[in-house]
Amino acid sequence: MEMQLQPADAGNPFADFIPRDEFSKRAGITKRTAEVWAHERKGPKVTIIGGRAYYHLDDVRAWLDSLRKGDAKREPKSRRAA
């Protein structure tokens, strides 16, 4: 699945930002997971504008590149105690 990361209006300085719900939908995660990632400083950088979370498309691209290269922070899988 390819993420389309093109701004809607190149003349608008806010066109390069997508809201959290759109990021979540494109990434195939829940909005709550995106909130947790932001709190734990995982995933792309978050910008707060007017009390709402937005993701700059360049930050999303950089994060995706880091995943592809294996540089992103990942949680170790927990093991059950035997």
Image (spheres, rainbow, N blue to C red):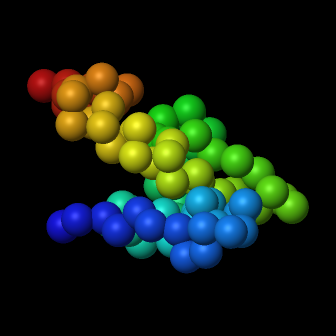
Outermost left residue: 82
Q: Quadrant of residue 27?
A: bottom left
The answer to whether residue 20 is seen in the rendering is yes
Question: Could you tell whether 18 is left or right of 81 in the image?
Answer: right
Q: Quadrant of residue 49?
A: bottom right
Task: Please determine whether, in this image, residue 66 is positioned above or below residue 50.
Answer: above
Task: Please determine whether, in this image, residue 52 is positioned above or below residue 46.
Answer: below
Question: Could you tell whether 49 is left or right of 4 in the image?
Answer: right
**Nearer to the camera, 40 or 56:** 56
Outermost right residue: 50
Quarter of the image with the N terminus in it: bottom left
Outermost bottom residue: 8
Q: Position of residue 59 (x, y in %)?
A: 51, 43
Question: Could you tell whether 10 is left or right of 2 in the image?
Answer: right
Task: Please determine whether, in this image, residue 61 is positioned above or below residue 73.
Answer: below
**Nearer to the camera, 47 or 15:** 15
Residue visible at 48% across and 36% down in the picture: 42
Residue visible at 60% across and 68% down in the picture: 10
Quarter of the image with the C terminus in it: top left
Outermost front residue: 11
**Nearer to the camera, 63 or 30:** 63
Q: Position of residue 25 (x, y in %)?
A: 42, 72
Q: Position of residue 15 (x, y in %)?
A: 64, 67
The answer to whether residue 30 is seen in the rendering is no
How many numbered marks appear? 0
Residue visible at 40% across and 46% down in the picture: 61
Q: Position of residue 73 (x, y in %)?
A: 37, 26
